[in-house]
Amino acid sequence: MTFPSAALWLLGNEYLEMHQAELDYLSGCHKDTRRNSRLAFYYDLDKQIRSVERYLRKLEFHISKVEELYEAYSIQCRLRDGALNMKHAFSLSPSTKASRESLVELYKNLQECTEDMCLIEGTLEVHLGEFHLKMKGLVGYARLCPGDQYEVFIRLGRQKWKLKGKIETDDSQTWDEEEKIFIPNLHEKFEIKVTELRGLSSLLVGTVKCDSIDFFMTRPQTIIVDVTELGTIKLQLEVLWKLYLDVPTSLPLR
């Protein structure tokens, strides 16, 4: 399972590096302010530094918890693979009473491994934060005309987002919803379907699937998805991955 390991890498590098850089910057401002004797701002800055330090400690603990879960999952995965290999070996051997009893025990072990892995996956997903998606519009050049109306449907597992939009006379776009939060899913991909609405009828423009591993970025990024095979219509989404941890608010520096 590569999904959690990629998330772990991002957690351990981008998030820590980003907030460590913020802490280093604030510490430098802290020294300059102390020399300049700006007491009121000095105390505000000191409070901000302590807040970032607490957040970094929480982040490190969060990462260690995810690593612990991933290690437990990897162990169960190896146990399951070993049981599957033994099951295959028994299937190639002559059937005896002992081999049948061993197969029963193997089936039991496989079921236990599968159940344990499902429990770990559920816990791991809770620790992977959330995706914030923002609709930026469709891109189609000659394909998009004033007055055209579209429906965009986005699904991740059981989570769904349906929104409708219209191309205005000045080529701008209006959408009835602009933002949606999705919880990461270890096995499901994002499914995107775009439909052109034509009065009482509709025309399917295209469907596409996106691997959610590309959505794990600590800073907002714009993702452009080809909806049609030739890329004549594209969907633009702004994506931001957030952890559930309370991020300290940056202090405005004067």
Image (tube, rainbow, N blue to C red):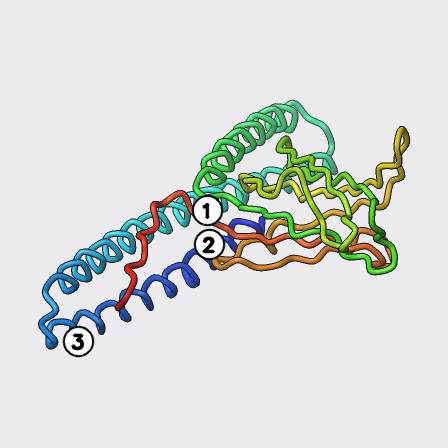
Q: Amino acid at mark 3?
A: Asp
Give the numbered dot on residue 32. Answer: 3
- Circle 2 is placed at which residue position? 8
Q: Report if the CB atoms under discs 3 and 1 are less than 8 Å apart.
A: no
Residue at point 73%, 38% (across, down): 164
Residue 58 in the image, given as x and y percentages of width and height: 29, 49
Question: How far separated are the C-alphas under marks 2 and 3?
Answer: 36 Å
Residue 60 in the image, given as x and y percentages of width and height: 32, 53
Q: Secondary structure at mark 2?
A: helix
Residue at point 49%, 42% (across, down): 73
Q: Secondary structure at mark 1?
A: helix
Q: Report if the CB atoms under discs 2 and 3 are less than 8 Å apart.
A: no
* Neighbour tally class for label 3: few under 14, some 14-19, many 20 plus, Cα within 10 Å: few
Residue 230 in the image, given as x and y percentages of width and height: 87, 59
* Neighbour tally class for label 2: few under 14, some 14-19, many 20 plus, Cα within 10 Å: some
- Depth order, front residue of 209/90: 209
Establish if 233 lies above or below 245.
below
Residue depth check, mark 2 versus mark 1: number of the one nearer the observer: 2
